[in-house]
Image (cartoon, rainbow, N blue to C red):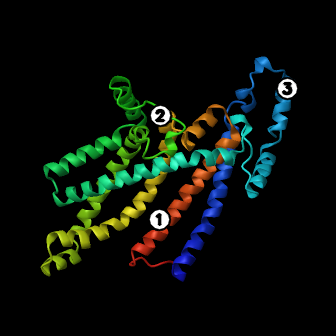
Amino acid sequence: MSGNVLGFLIRRVLVAIPVIFGLTIVMFLLIHLAPGDPVEAFISPGNASPQFIEQARKNYGLDKPLPVQYAIYMSHIARGDFGTAYTFNGKAVLTLIKDKAWATIVLQVVSIVIALLIAIPLGIISAVKQYSFIDNSTTVGAFIGWAIPNFWLALLLQFYLSVKLHWLPAISTAESSTAFPGNIKYFIMPIIVLALPSIAYFARFMRSAMLEVTHQDYMTTARAKGLHDRVVLLAHGLRNAMIPMVTVTGLQVARILSGAVIIEQIFAWPGLGYLAYTAITHRDYPVILGVTIIAGTFVILVNILVDVLYVIVDPRISLPS
């Protein structure tokens, strides 16, 4: 890595620090200002005295003013301590996240890789055979795939593939997330639901990128030199069309990660999305904050990595001084 790229990376990381800090403030305020009481969410008021509930709030530090609660929370974050869950048997938040992270990572990586492997050839064929039956079919299919709500598709697949046909299990198991590809049957429906919108998005973008480079001067020059159309397309056109795909792929990571919350809950997938959904239903503040802050930080770091890769891949981009 050259000095310019390293300096660019350092500057981006420094800019990301206040963004992450702002994320903690926003999430802390949203969670604590939401209506409801986290203590009453896991302690039935009918079975506990007001004194007991008040003591529970004091034990969790919920009786203090919000600025004081935030200062205490950030002091713990600075030491690498994301707190202890109110529920989940009182486990440490970082332990819960570590236990669930791998299941989400596997699901996300497989989904986005499959989406790219399908979408890139579709986009290239659509661009080469513009306005043909293949191009029109791909365009219509992309619009449909982008428009279908993922939660509706998930329920539809469960109904037909699991309930009606008994081909696939309707929900996951605790072991299925760590056994890919051995337990591939548990992956099929979640991956389809997460990958389909990405396939539609990537295919349309790849088509546009290929159409843009097809009529560039360097493509005409390559053809004039007598190179075969396939060589011109793959060696010159595809290479340049893939450069913006780096950025698009990074931006799509955030969308897939956010969609995983509902999808993991529908399929009972033991990942971070399912953990976040369960924590929200139980108003488990430390777990909600821990998952959202770590997930937000991950998205920010992915975007920084994409910017750096974009600069490395495309030498025409000049780094700011």
Is 251 placed left or right of 289 in the picture?
left
Circle number at residue 52: 3
**SS label for mark 2:** loop
Residue sitting at the far front:
182
Q: Secondary structure at mark 3?
A: helix
Mark 1 highlights which residue? 306
Is disc 2 surrounded by few (<14), some (14 to 19) or many (20+) residues within 10 Å? Answer: many
Q: Which residue is mark 2?
A: 267
Task: State which mark lies toward you, 2 or 3.
Answer: 2
* Residue 205 placement (x, y as % from top left): 32, 57
Mark 2 vs mark 3: which is more N-terminal?
A: 3
Occupied quadrant, residue 151: top left
Q: Please, what secondary structure does the residue beneath circle 1 have? A: helix
Taking the image as shown, residue 310 lies to the left or right of residue 222, namely right
**Does residue 259 appear in this view?**
yes
Where residue 199 sits in the image (x, y, percent)? Answer: 33, 49
Q: Nearer the viewer, residue 214 or 116?
A: 116
Residue at (81, 42) in percent of width and height: 65
Q: Which sits earlier in the primary sequence, circle 1 or circle 3?
A: 3
Residue under the point 66% across and 31% down: 282
| Closer to viewer: mark 1 or mark 2 | 2
Kindly identify the residue that appears in the image at 40 percent across and 63 percent down. 246
Is 14 above or below relative to 180?
Answer: below
